[in-house]
Amino acid sequence: MNKKVLNMLIAFIAVAIIIAILWLVFPIIAPNDYVPYTGHMFGGWMMPFGMIGMGIFWIIVIVFVINALDNRKEQDHDDYISKLKARLAKGEITIEEYETLKNKLKEGM
């Protein structure tokens, strides 16, 4: 997993936990006549946990998509190397050309 994606995931989870804590604590510090979201879903206190769950779900989906794209790049690189090996075996290119092209592919990927 990419370090940047991992840091974003940790930051999102931390913000979501802070929001959930504030959501739960706010009715305690609010005036007595103010009661948010009463009458459904346990008086509304489950909403932050649903938000956290949905956020984690979408982050997992995004991480899987990013990993799939990274694996695709590696697979393309392996395909290029195998094509170079086939050209070398057929005698279309020399060993020096093969090494040069392989190094260029490593630099480009």
Image (spheres, helix red, strand yellow):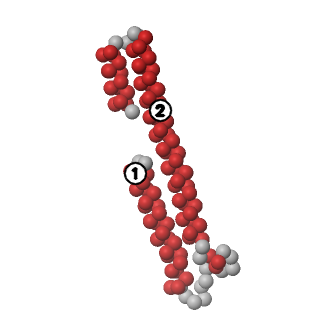
Q: Which residue was labeled with disc 2?
A: 75
Q: In the structure shown, which secondary structural element does the residue marked by tag 1 occupy?
A: helix
**Is the residue marked by circle 1 packed among few (<14), some (14-19), or many (20+) residues within 10 Å?**
few
Q: In the structure shown, which secondary structural element does the residue marked by tag 2 occupy?
A: helix
* Viewport quadrant of the C terminus: top left
Q: Residue 29 vs residue 44: left or right?
A: left
Depth order, front residue of 3/88:
88
Q: Distance between the residues labelled 1 and 2?
A: 22 Å
| Residue 28 percent location from the top left of the image | 53, 85
Location of residue 98 (image quadrant): top left
49 w.r.t. 92: above or below:
below
Q: Which residue was labeled with disc 1?
A: 4
Report the residue at 59% width, 67% height from top.
50
The type of residue carrying mark 2 is: Gln
Q: Residue furthest top?
A: 91
7 w.r.t. 42: above or below:
above
Report the residue at 49% width, 36% height from top.
72
The type of residue carrying mark 1 is: Lys
Q: Which residue lies furthest to the left in this view?
A: 96
Report the residue at 43% width, 48% height from top.
1
Counting every numbered tag in the picture gives 2
Location of residue 36 (image quadrant): bottom right
Depth order, front residue of 54/85:
85
